[in-house]
Image (tube, rainbow, N blue to C red):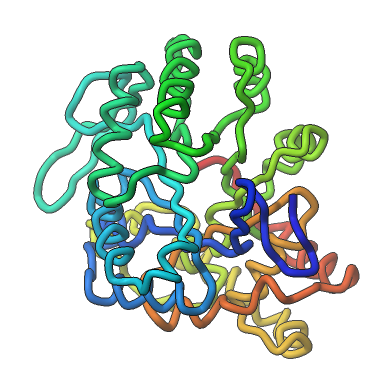
Amino acid sequence: MVDQKTQFLSLLPGRPVPRIWFGAWAIGGWHWGGPNDTASQQALLHAFEQGITAVDTAPIYGFGHSETLIGKALRALPFDLRKQAFIATKFGLRWNGSGTPFFDTQHQGSSIHVTRNLSKVSILEECDASLRRLDIEAIDLYQVHWPEPGRPLEEVASAVETLLAQGKILAFGFCNWSVENLIDWNKISRFRPTAIQEKFSLLNRKIETGLLQYTVKHQIPVLAYGTMAQGLLAGAVPVERVFEASDGRSRSRAFESGMRMKIREALDSLTDIAEKYRCSAAELAVAFALCTAGISAALVGLRTLTQVDAINRAAQIPLEPGDYTRIRRTFEPLQFHGH
């Protein structure tokens, strides 16, 4: 449930978390042109000081590097802030191991073969590895990163039940999970997900026609990732910028110069709304997500102090219905679907 007055989300008893989360994919470096550990550590610590105490990561983010950086940041926090930390990570993607082939990539000069693996043995191994890297006793929210076609869901359910019983995880959820997947899960497990994580932004509202309807009906919080579309909606990506081959944005249709120009024009047309709420383009994009019915929290990719400060007020921006509708209509022609 979302407390609209205090802007906190309740996922675990007695553990309020903010509606803006620190998305930790970028700090891992992979897909983002390499890591900058000093800046990432500063951003993490600053985010906690500013009240952004929920962090979402995954082993695949930098192949363990993102989790390791978060563990280091947690150790550097004062005790009272560390107690407030809510750590979410994921499982189901392995590199250079067994499982169902997913994709091939490059990282630091090496070829990496990524697979989906939701076997019980693999899940238990992944959990222990994440706990070591994060240097914590229990993961607050443990999420299936992607479904694995053909893998019996009973294996996942058995692993989740084991980890909950052992106290290694406190709650579980799903990422990139369809309504059909959820219905199948409910048939084989008595445990219900604490949250569902999916892509949602001004550029991608695909889940409105299916998943959001289901989660609202069944009162399942939705954690929206990609709310700033990897920086595009912050207006911080110059049209003329050329991305290195190691940066995944160099291969994205959304980052083609023509598309970047259209996005910039759309943002410019909404300058008066941003001025009305005294907010940045980034805050406006995140506020739009948080004002969308069914969206409980926004996961925002961050890795610099400036980026943290640029979105810090977004949860306190109550967009008026007319402004929300105008923002929505402005970006209607620019919709991307898929991943």
The residue lying at 76 percent from left, 32 percent from top is: 214
- Is residue 31 shown left or right of residue 4? left
- Is residue 59 shown left or right of residue 270? left
- In the rendered view, tell whether residue 316 sits above or below residue 28: below
The residue lying at 70 percent from left, 35 percent from top is: 211
Between 308 and 230, the one lying in front of the other is 308
Q: Position of residue 296 (x, y in %)?
A: 69, 53
The quarter of the displayed image where residue 105 is located? top left
Taking the view exactly as shown, the residue that stands out farthest to the left is: 109
Q: Where is residue 141 in the image (x, y as percent from the top left)?
A: 49, 42
Is residue 103 visible in the rendered image? The answer is yes
The quarter of the displayed image where residue 23 is located? bottom left
Between 107 and 251, the one lying in front of the other is 107
Is residue 63 visible in the rendered image? The answer is no
Taking the view exactly as shown, the residue that stands out farthest to the right is: 322
Between 126 and 104, the one lying in front of the other is 126
- Is residue 96 shown left or right of residue 282? left
Q: Position of residue 74 (x, y in %)?
A: 33, 63
- In the rendered view, tell whether residue 330 sits above or below residue 225: below
Number of marks: 0
The residue lying at 64 percent from left, 69 percent from top is: 285
Q: Position of residue 164 (x, y in %)?
A: 47, 29
The residue lying at 60 percent from left, 51 percent from top is: 224
